[in-house]
Image (cartoon, coloured by chain):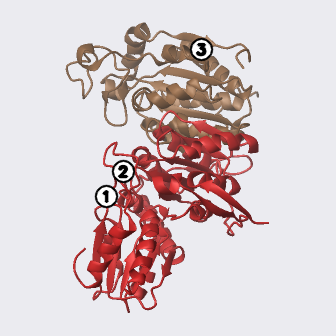
Chain colours: A brown, B red
């Protein structure tokens, strides 16, 4: 009998601790599948951000470095400059990447570091208990925007995938979602493409996931998926914002 | 053959890094240490090394963390405010047990301060500097020769202990030119780097981290680090003494303050005063045993510092209970002159306050 579905080699055989309906587990799986697909497990090193993301080292069966909050792209830069033939990826949340780590992500992209960045945007600080994130939508209530995010006080949610796509150093920038099977298949393709580009030395690749956080949104998993469709995607459109076809820029 | 070079302190240090096989440098411009990145941006390219001018000191120290995790010898340099920005990363390096060399060619402070020579960062350097219960090894050169030689040692000690090493210089040591002997680098015997992240090929995955959440883990990790610092105290304390045999008064000073003190002590000797010098070369570990031993006989000490009183606390903690410890401070702005220190020495010599 032909086996059509199994645990990716790059994931350890242990259950995820994430909350019910959280998309982190699915994102972990897609990243692991991409690593397996190109047979990169034994030469891949992950860099964990701070937040729910930090636990990638519990689940991936690969070498992992833990970075200070927001600094994963700088740590990845150091690793990649030493180990140019290895695959380096960071895994960061929205507080980590788009708030405290904004400087590092922008300059790492701008240098065209040949790494892959997995960005999990769930519009909220998950691990610390649901505070306002740089990607929190206008009007969205969080524990630190109890009356809803107000642009006069808090500014606007930041669209990272579009912003990084404007940089010359960025080779691939995409936003994907997991709320429907069709979106999930596109997400799988984008992650695969991001790692493929790195493996071919094509430069900085970035994949932003719109991710559900039912616990901190106060919704059940089904409602959370509906929110991704109705509220997140209209503000954070899905798609590929930049994709270099070759080494034309080098 | 040993060559003699006439070279600037910052360049002697940078040349030392290249000799010690450091091939990765990450830094951000700040005066008065710019000669180091300028020299290395030119020289590292010639030895297939990598120089990155980072977007900030925060990024520099974390690039250093990544390069170190990959097993490379790597360094950064900065000056006081930049070193303040690096403290989070230094704490992570210590917590993750990663070797790294961090050069602080200090400015004066607090705040933006000035670019003149200062020893105001003694506390920051010797007490860890960032959050958490940790220490960095701290080396304090007082000549261009030592800017070079202690850099060679710094890379070895970082690898030996898997711990960050700070080289604490200042504007005088970084900017002055002196003759230096370009000795061959003879590395210490070092443990194998069997912990580096290289990709889990044919082995179990490795992890570089400082997060410990499980019951008892954090406590065990802190005790493990503590034992390392105890071993440093036992094995790495370094100091220089001169004219202490017949001394009635011993001056304790490091770095630039020690240089000026040497001249002041010569002037004092010319006037018949029996004054000696105790110069800590490692600030952590502080050479407490050497000082304790000396204080069995000498009962009067004068800590001379280019600040308002920092190392004097370690001097007081080190000497025998019946020894007197005095302090003379010259806060930054201009460096102290020997005549000024001579006056302080004369006052303390007869038992008065400086």
Q: Which mark is residue A186?
A: 3
Above or below for A36 versus B75: above
Asked if labels 1 and 3 share a chain, the reply is no
Q: Residues within 10 Å of mark 2 (few under 14, many from 20)?
A: many
Expressed as whole percent of the image width and height from the top left, the position of residue B329 reads 30, 65
Real-space Cα distance between discs 2 and 3?
55 Å
In the depicted structure, whether residue A54 falls above or below residue A247: below
Q: Kindly check if marks 1 and 2 are in contact, taking CB atoms under 8 A apart as contact.
A: yes
Q: Which chain is mark 1 on?
A: B
Upstream in the sequence, badge 1 or badge 2? 2
Classify residue A102 by image quadrant. top left
- Answer whether residue B217 is visible to the viewer in this image: yes
Question: Viewed as shown, does residue A140 lie left or right of B182?
Answer: left
Instruction: Please give the name of the residue rendered at 24% of the width and 28% of the height, measured from the top-left corner.
Output: A144
| Location of the N terminus of chain A (image quadrant) | top right
Cα separation between marks 1 and 3: 63 Å
Residue B286 at least partly seen: no
User: Against A169, is A84 above or below?
Assistant: below
Q: Which disc, if any, is residue B108?
A: 2
Quarter holding the C terminus of chain A is top right
- Badge 1 is on which residue? B331
Question: Mark 1 or 3, which is nearer the eye?
Answer: 1
2 and 3 marks in contact (CB < 8 Å): no
**For the point 67% across and 69% down, which residue is it?**
B188
């Amino acid at each position: 009998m032909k086996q059509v579905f199994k645990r990716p080699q790059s994931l350890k055989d242990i259950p995820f601790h994430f909350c019910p309906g959280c998309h982190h587990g699915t994102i972990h799986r897609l990243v692991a599948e991409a690593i397996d697909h190109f047979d990169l497990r034994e030469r891949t090193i992950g860099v964990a951000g701070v937040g729910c993301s930090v636990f990638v080292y519990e689940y991936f069966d690969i070498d992992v470095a833990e970075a200070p909050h927001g600094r994963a792209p700088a740590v990845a830069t150091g690793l990649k400059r030493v180990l140019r033939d290895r695959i380096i990826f960071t895994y960061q949340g929205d507080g980590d990447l788009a708030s405290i780590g904004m400087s590092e992500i922008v300059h790492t992209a701008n240098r065209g570091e040949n790494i892959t960045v997995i960005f999990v945007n769930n519009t909220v600080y998950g691990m610390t208990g649901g505070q306002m994130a740089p990607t929190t939508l206008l009007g969205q209530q969080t524990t630190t925007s109890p009356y809803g995010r107000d642009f006069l006080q808090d500014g606007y949610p930041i669209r990272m995938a579009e912003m990084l796509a404007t940089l010359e150093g960025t080779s691939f920038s995409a936003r994907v979602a997991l709320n429907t099977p069709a979106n999930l298949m596109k997400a799988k393709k984008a992650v695969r493409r991001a790692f493929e580009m790195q493996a071919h030395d094509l430069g900085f690749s970035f994949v932003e996931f719109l991710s559900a956080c039912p616990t901190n949104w106060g919704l059940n998993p089904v409602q959370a998926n509906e929110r991704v469709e109705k509220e997140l995607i209209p503000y954070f459109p899905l798609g590929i914002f930049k994709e270099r076809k070759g080494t034309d820029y080098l | 053959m040993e060559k003699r070079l006439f070279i600037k302190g910052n360049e002697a240090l940078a040349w030392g890094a290249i000799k010690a096989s450091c091939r990765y440098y990450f830094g951000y411009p700040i005066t008065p240490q710019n000669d180091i990145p300028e020299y290395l941006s030119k020289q590292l390219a010639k030895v297939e090394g990598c120089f990155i001018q980072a977007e900030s000191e925060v990024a520099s120290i974390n690039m250093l963390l990544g390069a170190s995790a990959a097993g490379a010898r790597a360094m950064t340099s900065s000056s006081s405010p930049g070193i303040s920005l690096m403290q989070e990363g230094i704490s992570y390096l210590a917590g993750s047990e990663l070797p790294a060399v961090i050069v602080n060619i200090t400015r004066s402070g607090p705040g933006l301060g000035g670019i003149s020579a200062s020893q105001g960062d003694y506390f920051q350097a010797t007490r860890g500097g960032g959050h958490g219960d940790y220490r960095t090894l701290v080396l304090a050169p007082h000549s261009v020769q030592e800017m070079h030689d202690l850099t060679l040692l710094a890379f070895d000690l970082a690898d030996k202990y898997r711990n960050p090493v700070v080289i604490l210089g200042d504007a005088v040591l970084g900017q002055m030119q002196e003759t230096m002997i370009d000795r061959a680098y003879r590395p210490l015997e070092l443990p194998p780097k069997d912990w580096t992240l290289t990709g889990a090929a044919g082995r179990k995955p490795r992890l570089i981290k400082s997060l410990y959440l499980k019951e008892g883990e954090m406590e065990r990790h802190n005790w493990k680090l503590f034992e390392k610092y105890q071993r440093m105290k036992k094995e790495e304390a370094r100091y220089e003494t001169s004219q202490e045999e017949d001394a009635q008064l011993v001056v304790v000073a490091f770095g630039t303050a020690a240089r000026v003190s040497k001249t002041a002590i010569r002037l004092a000797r010319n006037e018949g005063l029996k004054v000696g010098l105790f110069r800590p070369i490692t600030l952590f570990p502080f050479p407490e045993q050497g000082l304790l031993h000396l204080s069995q006989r000498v009962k009067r000490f004068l800590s001379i510092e280019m600040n308002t009183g920092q190392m004097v606390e370690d001097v007081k903690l080190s000497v025998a209970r019946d020894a007197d410890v005095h302090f003379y401070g010259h806060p930054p702005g201009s460096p102290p002159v020997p005549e000024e220190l001579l006056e302080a020495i004369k006052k303390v010599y007869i038992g008065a306050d400086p």
